[in-house]
Image (cartoon, grey):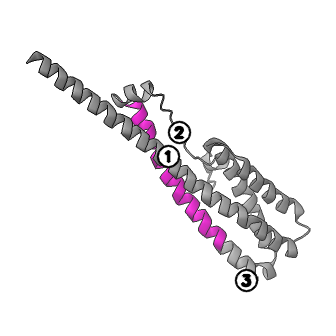
Amino acid sequence: MTVGIIVAILAITIIWAISVYNGLVNKKVNVQEGWSSIDVFLKKRNDLIPNLVETVKGYASHESSVLQNVVEARNLSGKAQSAKEQGVAESTMQNAMMNLFAVVENYPDLKANSNFISLQQDLNALEDDIEMARRYYNGTVKENNIAIDVFPSNVIANTFKFEKAEFFEIQNASEREVTKVNF
């Protein structure tokens, strides 16, 4: 009878370990899937930006520094290798695009151009998709990291060298500053 209890405990422990291991693998794959979605949307946006720059260049060719900053931000985004690097690149991209659209405000003909309007709408839709993908990715990172940290699954995670994933955060210092209001 004692042998049967020991075998039963051992079997339950092995089944539990396999279950926890499979759950950790599932969470890891979800994180990879989430990042893949972000990557697809970022590539779509990076493919759209040259068309946008060319359209603006036709109207505002003397604004070359603003256009150059957008191109550099696009290149930085394309070279990012991690969530942290992509966060820095996204901050740079946001600033460059804000400056670009500020310049566009000075050109009523450009704002009325159907090609520009279409590109702007496509860009806005992609930005929404990127935001949704970012939220999904960060949610999967949270679940993954919690599973790696909490007991008893951390025993399996440490044994099989599961690693925490990085959150995808925009590295924009101005977003973190407290807004000052003066009356």
Please give the range of residues in magenta: 122-150
Q: Residue at x 23, y 23 (%)?
A: 10
Q: Residue at x 47, y 32 (%)?
A: 162
| Image quadrant where one finds the C terminus | bottom right
Q: Which mark is residue 31?
A: 1
Q: Quadrant of residue 99?
A: bottom right
Q: Within the magenta stretch, is there residue 181?
A: no
Query: Distance from label 2 to label 1 (Cα)?
Result: 8 Å
Query: Distance from label 2 to label 3 (Cα)?
Result: 42 Å
Q: Identity of the amino acid at label 2?
A: Ala
Q: Which mark is residue 165?
A: 2
Task: Read off the residue under disc 3.
Answer: 114
Residue 62, x across and y down, in percent: 92, 68
Q: Identity of the amino acid at label 3?
A: Ser
Horizontal relation, residue 88 to residue 69: left or right: left
In this view of the protein, which residue sits in the foreground, 78 or 167? 78
Residue 27, x across and y down, in percent: 43, 43
Horizontal relation, residue 120 to residue 35: left or right: right
Q: Are marks 2 and 1 in contact (CB under 8 Å)?
A: yes
Secondary element under disc 3, as helix, strand or loop, is helix
State whether residue 172 appears in this view. no
Disc nearest the viewer among 2 and 3: 2
Residue 37, x across and y down, in percent: 55, 56
Q: Within the magenta stretch, is there residue 138?
A: yes
Q: Identity of the amino acid at label 1?
A: Val
| Image quadrant where one finds the N terminus | top left
- Label 2 crowding class (10 Å Cα cut-off): few <14, some 14-19, many 20+? some
Could you tell which of marks 2 and 1 lies nearer the N-terminus? 1
- Label 3 crowding class (10 Å Cα cut-off): few <14, some 14-19, many 20+? few
Q: Which mark is residue 173?
A: none
